[in-house]
Image (tube, grey):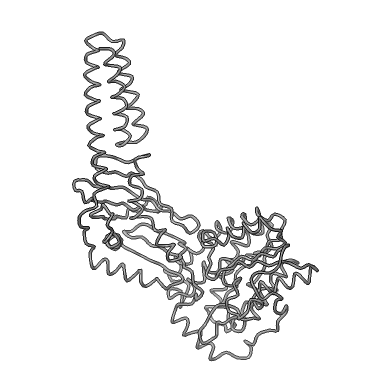
Amino acid sequence: MKVAVVIFGVLAAVSVGIAALFKFGELFAILAFVFVLAAAIYGLFAPRPVLGGILAGVLVVFVASTAFVGLGVFQLVKALTDTEGPIDAPDPVALASADAKVDEIKDSVAFRLELTEDEMTAYVLDGLQGEGDNPLRSVSLDVVDGADGEQGSLLFDAEFKSGGVGASGSVSIKLEMGAVQVDLDDISLGAFSMPGIAENALEDLVERIADFNTTLAEAKADVQAITIGNDRIVIVGTQVGTNLLTSQALLSGLQQAAASAVNALDPPPERLGAGRVNSTTEGSGPFYVALGDSLAANVGVLEPRDGYVSRFHNTVEARDGTTYGLRNLGIPGETTGTLIRAGQLDDAIAFIKENEVAYVSIDIGANNLLGHLGSDACSETLSNQVCQSRLTSAFDGYGADMEFIFDEIINAAPDATVIFMVAYNPFSLGLGTELEATTDATLTDFNRIAATIATDKGILIADAFTPMVRTTGSTTHMLDSEPDIHPVPIGYDILAGALLDALG
């Protein structure tokens, strides 16, 4: 009988441990395993009547826990593999509302998407339609407010086509450099809670519901803030584009300003002149490497030699008496998040590590903010609540992004001269409008974030903001028939001069 107690005691300890793992988690699994095993070991020293009771107990535990695990595994396998059957139709009113909101921001450089619980549920159900390998029959989403103003969470309940089995759980969402990070909490399927390794069975399933990264990547979007609460989710961010002015009211105002512009808006003479290199690539080391957005990419002028990169390259060659190679990696529409995640920073680091580099310039961050300033929400005043929420989102996370970018560059090129160019204000036209003053103040605060971090790390600051104040009516395309924030040649000459001045 003692041998039987030991054998079935070990089996019962293992099976009850597995059952506790699936139902309650690792800690309870360990406790259950130890308790049953200890009872079996105690039976080795117990009198015969007690030994019989212990044997009966471990047999009951073994049979019950094995049956529980077997039934649960059967339900799990059936639920996840049975893909035959219809999917519940989404609510047509909620789906139409969600589609309209998504369509409205598809072509917006800066966006604010607000979806209610019903709209999110309808959107998810619509996405599941037509997926032949989908085991879900229905899904419902519920937003739960966080405590004391903290971020809320997203609860989901799902029913499977196999019938009789449901899944539920909570999803917490946070941002890291423009990417959505999804954490699964309290996941359950049928009789099982799904901690630890068992949770992986639902990983792909839950990502269909909660992981927005695929959609965001396809839209080339950089999420700046996600707010979950008050029965809705609000996503604020930007997506790649060079036309940052989307407000018709703002564009109309600029056209009126252009009609009344006077000679005081005539551009100043060029200081540095066009560059020598009419390309983004030139020669061999030592190199000048430029990272950035549409400014580095020469948007607004016809030839690369008119951009600030080629102008600065030509000037430092003359100043240093050295022929420098050139690698301009700038990409239009880039934000700090896309610079980090979409490949430009990785390409720059790889190139810098393999070559001798004398200078590195970085212009990034304007697209984090300017798309919001050029939107309908901010067209009349920056003080309204919607505009302020957009601007706050742009500010949040900017410093962390810039610290990461600076550290990567410094570590890759410890001996290079690194220069960061702060953003100018394209709305500073020189016409004396209220918009000029308020956006000047906003850009000043925004620039201070990255400039402070750069200075602390020994990076030089190119002040592109100050020399462009009240000049952009003549130094950019802002007063063209189709207003555009990008510089004309004299504007790029001013930016190149800011880089030169940073060298002292």
The percent position of residue 223, horizontal first and vertical second, equals 45, 62
Quarter in which the C terminus is drawn: bottom right
The percent position of residue 189, horizontal first and vertical second, equals 27, 44
The percent position of residue 173, horizontal first and vertical second, equals 40, 53
Determine the image quadrant of residue 234.
bottom left
Name the foreground residue: 269 vs 357: 357
Residue 405, above or below 81? below
* Residue at 22% across, 58% down: 87
Determine the image quadrant of residue 54.
top left
Quarter in which the N terminus is drawn: top left
* Residue at 48% across, 69% down: 240
| 335 left or right, relative to 304 | left
Residue 299, above or below 256? above
Residue 195, above or below 125? above
* Residue at 33% across, 16% down: 41
Name the foreground residue: 404 vs 63: 63
| 103 left or right, relative to 404 | left
The percent position of residue 343, horizontal first and vertical second, equals 54, 60
Name the foreground residue: 383 vs 289: 289
Can the viewer see residue 385?
Answer: no
In the rendered image, the residue lying farthest to the top is: 47
In the rendered image, the residue lying farthest to the right is: 321
| 422 left or right, relative to 157 | right
* Residue at 66% across, 58% down: 352
Residue 412, above or below 482? above
